[in-house]
Amino acid sequence: MRLVVVGASGRMGRMLIQAVAGTEGCTLAGAVEREGAEAVGQDAGSLAGLAPLGVAVTDDPLRVFAEADGVLDFTAPAATVAYAELAAQARIVHVVGTTGLRPEDLAKLAAAARHARIVRSGNMSLGVNLLAGLVRKVAATLGEDFDIEILEMHHRHKVDAPSGTALLLGEAAAEGRAVALAERKVAVRDGHTGARAPGSIGFATLRGGSVVGDHSVIFAGPGERIELGHRAEDRGIFARGAVRAALWAQGQPPGLYGMNDVLGL
Ligand SMILES: NC(=O)c1ccc[n+]([C@@H]2O[C@H](COP(=O)([O-])OP(=O)(O)OC[C@H]3O[C@@H](n4cnc5c(N)ncnc54)[C@H](O)[C@@H]3O)[C@@H](O)[C@H]2O)c1
Ligand SMILES: O=C(O)C1=N[C@H](C(=O)O)CCC1
């Protein structure tokens, strides 16, 4: 499968180049960065700490999309919305790891998925997607006398909150309880908040250092607490998940898929 990495010089972009180069049956068909980025013109392999791959980073996505079967996109919301349109025009698979997408961005991805195969997930790792299944089950089993709180910590450079993973886990908890997350979500607490609203799903965000991604889902009940968690130690888990998603999506009809589809969960 010929894959393009957009956001090639980012923390995830470099990991994606490594993952594509290290996966049998995949070749790096292109590497794209935003106009004016320092990496434009550099060899994508060298950028990712590998031997040169003979693929120069470009700021012209159209040219490389025309020669590819799929694009791996861990960039920023505005870029991802634009790439969804280009990938749909080129009829290639679009794997979206970008987080911080607003409802109107998600609506644009859903529109593109009428003609394109898109796999989107706030977390492409096996572990977190398994954890989401456990959270759904525990939330469905326990009543509302168990309060659900989701705690996440990421590195100091992360720009969106709560993390895409925390929201994915919140969605799983809400599904388990058969409620809408949008109606139960409490993402900020400050000052005199009053007592906790029964049935709310709370989020707490920590940022600092080089943390790759820590998540805990806490079910706090009368006299006891259940905690389910995941610690990411290496961004390679997200990159390998994205390549797996692209390979899986190649054989699917147009639509918007998640990692649970890819992993058969
Ligand atoms: N879903 C997952 O499993 C997962 C895992 C890790 C990170 N992420 C998400 O991936 C995104 C990127 O994370 P990161 O840590 O690599 O960030 P980063 O800032 O290191 O990298 C983003 C890159 O995208 C580039 N970019 C921005 N606009 C572009 C455009 N129009 N065209 C091409 N490139 C463009 C930037 O120049 C930068 O190099 C974030 O939203 C993050 O939350 C998701
Ligand atoms: O480093 C990031 O940024 C990450 N983003 C995803 C999220 O928002 O959950 C996945 C974990 C790493």
Image: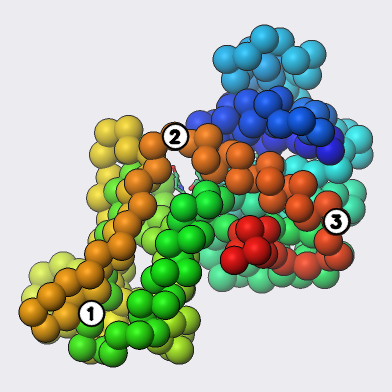
Q: Of the residues shown, which amino acid type is indicated by label 1?
A: Asp
Under circle 3, the secondary element is loop
Mark 3 or 1: the one toward you? 3
Measure how far apart labels 3 and 1 are at the Cα level: 41 Å
**Mark pair 2, 3: CA separation:** 29 Å
Q: Name the residue beneath numbered marker 3.
A: 251
18 with respect to 112 (left or right): left
Q: Is residue 198 above or below residue 5?
A: below
What residue does disc 2 label? 234
Which residue is rendered at x = 42% and y = 77% of the image? 137
Ligand 1: quadrant of the figure: top right
Residue count near mark 3 (Cα–Cα under 10 Å), binned few <14, some 14–19, many ≥20: few
Of residues 228 and 75, the one drawn nearer to the viewer in this rendering: 228
Q: Earlier in the sequence, mark 3 or mark 1?
A: 1
Q: Which residue is mark 1?
A: 147
Residue 109, how many percent across, how many down? 70, 64
Instruction: Give the quadrant of residue 53.
Output: top right
| Residues under numbered marks 3 and 1 in contact, where contact means CB atoms less than 8 Å apart | no
Give the secondary structure at mark 1. strand
Q: Residues within 10 Å of mark 1 (few under 14, many from 20)?
A: many
Is the C-beta separation of discs 1 and 2 under 8 Å? Answer: no
